[in-house]
Amino acid sequence: MAGCDAAGVLFTDPIFLFGFLPAALAGFFGAARLGQSWACAWLVIASLVFYGWFEPRFVPLLLGSLLLNHGVARLLEATRERRLQRVVLWAGIGINLAALAYCKYLAWLISLLDDWVGLGVAPPSIALPLGISFFTFTQIGYLLDVRDGEPHDRSAVRYAVFVTFFPHLIAGPILHHREIMPQFADPATYRFAPGNLALGASIFIVGLLKKTVLADPTATGVAEAFAHPEALPLFAAWNATLSYSLQLYFDFSGYSDMAIGLARMANVRFPLNFDSPYKAQSVIAYWQRWHMTLTRYLTRYLHDPLTLWAMRRRRARRLPVDRAAQVTLRGFGSMILVPVFVTIGLAGIWHGSGAQFLVFGLLHATWLTIARLWGLFRPARAEPGPFGRLWRVALTYLCVLVAAVFFRAPSVDAALAMLAGLSGLHGIGPALPLPASWLDAPAALPLPASWAEGAGALLHGIARPAEWHEGSAVMRQVLWLAALYAIVWGLPNTQQIFVRFDPALDTVRPGGPAWLRWRPTAPWALAVGALGMVALLSLGGTREFLYFQF
């Protein structure tokens, strides 16, 4: 993100693991002996320390956001006149969005205007406060619920914990007050529970392993490849794109597990935020599995209100709103296409400034619209067999992969260059090591001349013993990616492993053999301990979580 920096303490930082976390948990349960308010106040202070560890200057922004939104919520409750209440609500939302726009988008907008009209103004360098999107969206949702008269806890200290609780503060999940504030009103939350500590620590270790052992090593070469996509031939472009998709998968999956585990150590259950999205059989199902709390938030506060508004307008004009109306051009456009494109387009921009994020959102909006069209017009059929499910997963993943190129690329032009490389327009190489008996195979293939040359280079250019060293490195990368895909598509996810003990608030879909389901036994303790040692030994090269920049 041009013009912005982000810094903060990581869940993978030894200071966090061996200093902050034990102190935060011990202080929480110790303060609980004095009362719930003392324990909540301790968590708020600990969370502010966590948030401001490397950048104390952002703590006043977070505190100001807390005071503003809690004050607006109380004012909404006290205001009975509907029109005045709307003024208060939109003033509160406007201040929240103005702070978000200033930090995330001002530099980009000035740069964009300079390109269009020649302002001659250099974009300012604005530091990006960590987690600003998450705590801003969380509080806007709270204000909307208060306006709608939803029951809610009025305690200021529990509201502060709800917003600042450190496991979700930086990169989600986006919490709802009905999920978290009642847990902090429950006396059981404040009693130390060894079972929850063991369960939470085990989930945390699995997430730590994903981050340090699976996500970070996969990132090797990704940044350089996306910085110079115009130079990437077919195999290099696919390697970079597939590697990034797996890096992002395990990075966000690992973070989500760690957040759930940390909360559970404090007797708090979080909602699921990640549920094997690459196993989805449609883009609709993908968004129900990837960043699930963001999807829920946008559905509740943006997509559904837009759809209801369109339906009310149609009813006011005495037009139908049933399924038959949705298959008409105007009905589909007003009740499905516009809400989807507005919602997912804004979801793209939410992830960052830059036209590439807008294109990312619009691509997903296109895939979702096509899926909705298919659902409306396809004939009723029986459930697909194994091949049909495999085809659906592959097609969904390909759609996600194309959009991910724009999500990662530094610009739209760079993304288009990468897509050109993926299409083979920059050539074929590099070669893979293959047996000598395959060397003459390309001559019989009906390929275009340029592709035939590339295939010849692919097979002939590397089989000689002197060149096997480079080829073996390529093969190691191929095997590494294959192993990661085997984990993604062949193994149960973390929630399914810990399903016996309700790891999250949501219902966990079944999956995986019974012997892979965690239990508080000595063999499992040894296994998780060994995984923890591997994860800790891999901490040296740990990078920042990808979602910290959002």
Image (cartoon, rainbow, N blue to C red):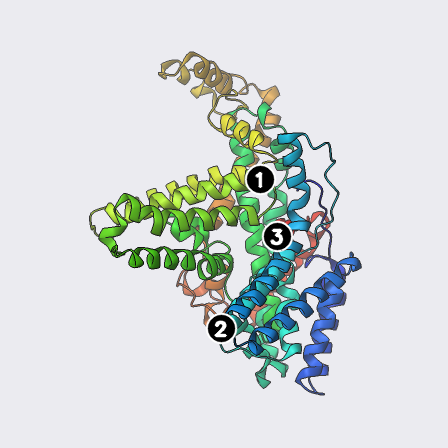
Labels 3 & 1 near each other (Cβ < 8 A): no
Looking at the rendered image, the disc whose residue lies closer to the viewer, 3 or 1, is 1
Q: Is residue 202 above or below residue 266?
A: above
> Hey, what amino acid is under mark 1?
Arg
The spot of residue 488 in percent (x, y) is 47, 49
- Cα–Cα gap, marks 1 and 2: 36 Å
Q: Amino acid at mark 3?
A: Lys
Residue 136 rendering spot, x and y as whole percentages: 61, 60
| Disc number for residue 211 | 3
Disc 1, SS: helix
Q: Which residue is mark 1?
A: 408
Earlier in the chain: of badge 3 and badge 1, it is 3
Tag 1 near tag 2, CB within 8 Å: no
- Label 1 or label 2, whichever lies nearer to me, is 1
Residue 255 in the image: above or below residue 525: above
Residue of label 2: 501
235 or 107: nearer the viewer = 107
C-alpha distance separating marks 3 and 1: 18 Å
